[in-house]
Amino acid sequence: MATRTERDALGTVEVPEDAYYAAQTQRAVQNFPVSGRTFGRPFIRAIGLVKESAAAVNSELKLLAPEIASAIQQAASEVIEGKLDGHFVLDIFQTGSGTSTNMNANEVVAGRANELLTGKRGGKEPVHPNDHVNLGQSSNDVIPTVIHIAASCLIQHGLIPALEKLFDRLAGKAVEFRDVMKIGRTHLQDAVPVRLGDEFGGYARQAELGMKRAKKALEALSELALGGTAVGNGINTHPEFAGRVIERIAAKTGCSFREARNHFEAQAAQDSAVEASGDIKTVAVSLLKIANDIRLMASGPRCGIGEITIPSLQPGSSIMPGKVNPVMPEMVIQVAAQVIGNDAAITLCGQGGFFELNTMLPVIALNLIESIEILASAAGLFAERCVAGISANRERCRSYIEQSLALSTYLVPYIGYDKASEISKEALNTGKTVRDVALRKAILPEEKLDEIFGEIGSGK
């Protein structure tokens, strides 16, 4: 691999060609490898947005020469587009403020801007990473801002549309199955009959509420810390800088961002990220319940519940021919488990605010972004590759109702709880249906029994 020699505060280092713009941070990686995990596209795109917008505003405020600002904007635009992702080399597990990654970004942008201006890659002239790219900023306000931007964009443009799709599919099934009666279940035991459509209507409502919770998470993340700089008092930044930059970022992302009302809160605490994560976790728990119900109703096909059939996506067993597993529901369940775990990590990170700074920002970023990404993917796939293809096994649903002991509940208004209970027990002991026992005991005229049980079967 081709290398170049670069000198920084730590000494001389041989830097791989593809990481030349980030020589200083590359040295840090060589000295302190931890997990090998680096920040992904949503985070890098967001930090590029901050640097591009900051340069534009600093030019407007006459704080940067036009040619310097233009070069920084072009370099930052390449960061936004993903052209320089290979230069973001730092491990996620680093200094708790994310300073290493902010400096990584400053060096990458400065290095590329210098190449654009001089033809020479890297360096600090004429564009300096701190004096120019980081002008008016601190890692302590940039990284919380980037977390909010990345998470908000993923929610608005990924998670909410996926939940809308899931809602549409579930609501469609609620209509399709509205005339299908099936046995209800409480405590995993037979209960009175319900409409299959009503069950799916309940799932649709969970997805609908999930959209509301995702929008609530957006609101929690809408205030940006930019402008607080080192400790929240805005030292070394123009008073108009943050407002203008945030307005520009909001226009570019389509998200409703605004400057934090109190910068000390925005940097010292990460309550907004904890709140947003809690909303996302709630959505995950909703999807877990839906996926589990669908998986159980589809169990079988002959020796399980078998009230519905879900699409067959792949052979489910390496040893049992013909066996097909509920791939999509199980995928959703696993994603939900991961999101719940991520939320626990974010909750712990929320406790990492000491005095004027939370120092667990990279782990908050890692887990919050991952939760939103995987939940959005799971919801979309579940909607299209499972829910859309579900069909009702009407005969199986009807046969369960006929066999159910819970039908004795419908006799209570006519004969009382105790007599209805006796009929239920006799049906269990003899293997007969509740209707057959009631008919043999002649507790009500046959016509009345036909009326009562006929209405159940017809779904009236």
Image (cartoon, grey):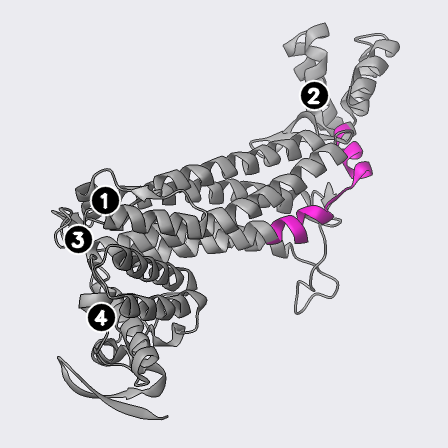
Between disc 3 and disc 4, whose residue precedes? 4
Q: Nearer the viewer, mark 2 or mark 1?
A: 1
Check disc 2 and report the residue beneath it. 424
Between disc 3 and disc 1, whose residue precedes? 3
Of the 4 image quadrants, the one containing the C terminus is top right
Q: Main structural element of the magenta stretch: helix, strand or loop?
A: helix
User: Disc 2 versus disc 1: distance between alpha carbons?
Assistant: 62 Å
Q: Above or below — where is 241 with respect to 196?
A: below
Q: Nearer the viewer, mark 1 or mark 4?
A: 4
Element class at badge 3: loop
User: Disc 4 versus disc 2: distance between alpha carbons?
Assistant: 79 Å
Element class at badge 2: helix
Check disc 4 and report the residue beneath it. 129
Which amino acid, by three-letter code, is at mark 3? Thr
**Badge 2: residue crowd in 10 Å (few <14, some 14–19, many ≥20):** many
Element class at badge 4: helix
Check disc 3 and report the residue beneath it. 237
Q: Nearer the viewer, residue 42 or 193?
A: 42
Of the 4 image quadrants, the one containing the N terminus is bottom left
Which image quadrant for residue 413?
top right
Q: Looking at the image, which residue is at 67% across and 7% down?
A: 416
Check disc 1 and report the residue beneath it. 266
User: Disc 3 versus disc 4: distance between alpha carbons?
Assistant: 16 Å
Magenta residues span: 381-401
Which image quadrant for residue 385?
bottom right
**Badge 3: residue crowd in 10 Å (few <14, some 14–19, many ≥20):** some
User: Disc 3 versus disc 1: distance between alpha carbons?
Assistant: 17 Å
User: Disc 1 versus disc 4: distance between alpha carbons?
Assistant: 25 Å
Percent coordinates x, y for residue 134 in the rendering: 22, 63
Percent coordinates x, y for residue 388 in the rendering: 70, 47
